[in-house]
Image (cartoon, rainbow, N blue to C red):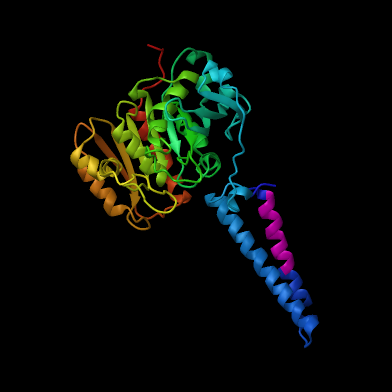
Amino acid sequence: MGLTSTAVLAVVAATAVALFAATVRFWPRLARPGAVAVSGRIGLLLATQLTLFAAVGLAANNAFLFYGSWADLFGREQELGVVTDHAEGVAGSPHLARIATRRPDVPGGRTPSAGGRIDQVVVSGRRSGIEAPAYVYLPPEYFRAAYAGRTFPAAVVLTGYPGTAENLLKGLRYPQTAHERVRAGKARPMILVMLRPTVAPPRDTECVDVPGGPQTETFFAKDLPEAVADSYRVGKEARDWGIIGNSTGGYCALKIGMLHPDRYAASAGLSAYYEAAEDPTTGDLFHGRRELRDRADLMWNLENRPPRGGSFLVTTSREGEDNLRSTMRFIEKVKAPARVSSIVLDSGGHNFTTWRREIPPALEWLSARLGGSRAPE
């Protein structure tokens, strides 16, 4: 059973209850001197406490998906290598291979024309040389005759660090939310390309082209949209593409959108920060090159190389987030022709509960700024 399985949580919680009942039941018998009785009391108390903490930990993890699997919990890379024949990728693309499909957890999910479809894919970067797993959500309209031969807007969706792409499906419910927004008439159908920014695990590259290292910016700015557009009915203009993420993924989304307005028309950072982190998880990102460090600093770019266009959405909260002041500074520094919008909650921490409150309006915001489905030009 998986780490996030409801059955695992139920078994551990039931064990904790049983041990508590056993402690109450047998305590009178153990309330006497002697090594056996003392050992029994210690054993029962310790076992009860451990299972109780385990149940609370599992419940918290199921709510926030800090870890997506047992391997993730114990620090082992969960993704096994997948041998793919790139000559037989989706729609003949050599840079994107579909390895599995799944049904979205939405009404009518068994039928693609009613619930859409999620493809599990591997993207191979033509320029960067990076291979990264991803999920591609195709909305129900993609499979309907009325939309046959039409292209759709797409949004790249990024987790935080270290994160797993599975978090975007289970914890943050992006496909379900997109489906609900369209059914409510508040958004247009979009294709979602969901993955983590950690494309060279376990290193956190901060979406930087590292000298002599992973070319992560190139992967997200060029390789990924090119591979997806060659494989699915997605528009190829900047107006057809958006990018959104939380935490590290939010920083990456804003930076990629700011530096590449010719590729992404809109970018949204949920609880984002505004300059690249540098710590043991990142290693040496810039190799002493000041121009590369400046390029990764969004405030520096707004002041010295203001974007030539694009729309930005930033989120924060007045209580619970530590990026409130920097987010207000970011908003002040964005000047025309670029545009900026914000979501400022009264309270909300740096967690999945907060982001689930921000994702529905963020998807509506993206939908309003990206091109709708249309016949190929």
- Where in the figure is residue 173, as x and y percent of width and height? 51, 40
Q: Describe residue 76's horizontal placement relative to residue 347 as left or right.
A: right
Q: Residue at x 29, y 35 (%)?
A: 258
Is residue 358 at least partly visible in the picture? no
Q: Residue at x 34, y 50 (%)?
A: 316
The magenta stretch spans which residues?
7-19
Q: Nearer the viewer, residue 127 or 173?
A: 127
- Where in the figure is residue 353, as x and y percent of width and height? 47, 50
Q: Residue at x 49, y 47 (%)?
A: 162
Q: Describe residue 53's horizontal placement relative to residue 37 as left or right.
A: left
Residue 209 is inside the magenta segment: no
- Where in the figure is residue 12, as x and y percent of width and height? 69, 58
Q: Describe residue 49's horizontal placement relative to residue 144 as left or right.
A: right
Q: Nearer the viewer, residue 75 or 43?
A: 75
Q: Nearer the viewer, residue 257 or 319?
A: 257
- Where in the figure is residue 108, as x and y percent of width and height? 60, 28
Quadrant holding the C terminus: top left
Rendered view: 57 above or below 223: below
Rendered view: 172 above or below 239: below
Q: How many numbered marks are there?
A: 0
Rendered view: 161 above or below 363: below
Residue, far bottom: 33
Q: Nearer the viewer, residue 163 or 60?
A: 163
Is residue 59 at least partly visible in the picture? yes
Please identify the dominant SS of the magenta region.
helix
